Amino acid sequence: MDLHFGDAEPTAEERAAVDALLGPPATAWEGGDRTAADLRSAARAEQARDRLLPALHAVNDRVGWISDGALTYICRRLTIPPAEAYGVASFYSLFSLEPRPPRVLHVCTDLACLAKGVREVRDGVPSPCLGLCERAPAALALEAGETPKAVVYGGSTAEDETPHTVERPEPPVEDAVPQAGSPGLVLLGRIGVVDPASLDDYRANGGYQALRRAFELGPVGVIREVTEAGLVGRGGAAFPTGRKWDATARQPDQPHYLVCNADESEPGTFKDRVLMEGDPYALVEAMTIAAYATGCRKGYLYIRGEYPRATRALETAIETARARGLLGPRVLGHDFAFDIELRRGAGAYICGEETAIFNSIEGYRGEPRTKPPFPVEKGLFGKPTVVNNVETLVNVLPILLTGGSDTKLFCVSGSVGRPGVYELPLGTPLRELIDLARPAGTLKAVLLGGAAGSFVTDLDVPLSFEGTRAAGATLGSGVVMVLDEEVDLPAFLVRIAAFFRDESCGQCVPCRVGTVRQEEALHRLGRRRSEADLVLLREVGQTMRDASICGLGQTAWNAVESAIDRLGAFK
Ligand SMILES: Cc1cc2nc3c(=O)[nH]c(=O)nc-3n(C[C@H](O)[C@H](O)[C@H](O)COP(=O)(O)O)c2cc1C
Ligand code: SF4
């Protein structure tokens, strides 16, 4: 792609895909021959930069890849320099700038699938974790066309020669929740009980009572309840939610924005997917309450591009809520306006970082910003923004109704008979959770917190934020990946390192170079033990931890370090 507008023209199909999203060009500035008069509309066209990611999706969904002509047309329509649009399009793994067939099979080669024996990919492209770990080994076929199709394959066996060619109906959501229907579930209480498409069903099962209570309490009262309940973020950083909401609500600068972080790409994490697929109205209601408390009129729900069923469920929920007056200019008849825009990611783990998500929504490369300023002061579009994880938000409903649940969701995968999402009180010993999931084989270690987490062998560690911290581990996003003696630990570590090398956005040196050096050293150590490489790994790891801009680089060495120190890897 050249740095200036080229002569390449879009095909009729590409043009139609873009026009279906943006509407037909209103001025020549937006795609036709330009006159001096058209230049006057440039300032207005500038505002459309945030349509870039949806426009790239539109073409990729329709045709399967993004040609020079299509990119040029998008650039003209949105007044974006082609080099910048190229930088954005090439940032995301679900987009292709080269021709490819309409159907692409993304085969997960990440940790949970690796633990289930996936080795090489014969009939698709290798993919980082697809968030389908309870069905590992898993794959996702995306098929472009006028009605794009997404088919999830899971639970195939390594011996199955053609696991990704036979289309089977997706199992019901509750299959991912071994405790489904049990009494005592709070966050998962409606999964498998309500029809996710039905607002009436949701309301008949307690839905929208929390929003009514919020209107009784007023914004200050809601923040007080959330603060007093001691809710901390479930996206990995465990930041107190009430403090974040209070700081946003107090900002004089307007407008305020709410961003729900549903990018869920940490290997081994799939709890948010299950919540969104099985109880989507709960998230819509919780976002509405968060917006009411923090003074937001607009919310973005940023969902990872590899979650087709959750995306459909939320599209339905948002449309229905809007049609029934639960979103829009007067929510539930109150003097409060709020609406939600669903934004699809396109295959970039880093976009889950809370400032990278802003850049992604705004139409820039999903690179994290330096902090400060913090999002509560200057976030999306430079305005005060509250970012919360899906599970964090869903926790607000029981807080307003009963004072809170004090439970946490755990994503159990690997060598267990009943993988899935479990809900248990914080502080439950790890052993109890693993027993519930029925361990298979002789346990070697548990990876807690995902690729950015660490290995533990002490099953008495309490599953709480403080308990895991005291044990030198982290709950992170709730990953509990069980590894048995059969696991090829060096290969597993290489896979973790490859993930971080692939997903590093590359903007800071310690992470860009360090993740490469880490992977190289692990490859060498897999062939031959070397003291020099162990020293190198430690130095590189420490540098990444100390000097990287964001959490990706800062945590990229955690799991490898714990494998060396606690599991005796490469002894
Ligand atoms: C590399 C990276 C990826 C992240 N991915 C996610 C994610 O997918 N979902 C999420 O909620 N938080 C993710 N986070 C954490 C967010 O930066 C942020 O802390 C979180 O969304 C805040 O919400 P919470 O306070 O409700 O947890 C990620 C952080 C980093 C450094
Ligand atoms: S630490 Fe890595 S992912 Fe984060 S900003 Fe730096 S290069 Fe990008």
Image: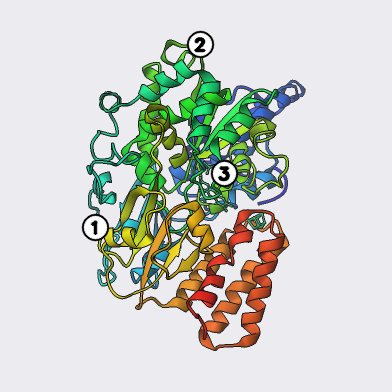
Mark sitting on residue 449: none
**Which residue is identified by label 3?**
239
Marks 1 & 2, CB-CB < 8 Å contact: no
Which amino acid type is marked by label 1? Val
Closer to the eye: label 3 or 2: 3
In the image, the residue with mark 3 has its CB under 8 Å from the nearest atom of ligand 1: yes
Total label count?
3
Point out the quarter of the image occupied by ligand 2: bottom right
In the image, the residue with mark 1 has its CB under 8 Å from the nearest atom of ligand 1: no
Q: Residues within 10 Å of mark 2 (few under 14, many from 20)?
A: few
Q: Residues within 10 Å of mark 3 (few under 14, many from 20)?
A: some
Pointer 1 or 3: first along the chain: 1
Pointer 1 or 2: first along the chain: 1
**Which residue is identified by label 1?**
166
Which amino acid type is marked by label 3? Phe
Q: 121 or 23, which lies in front?
A: 121
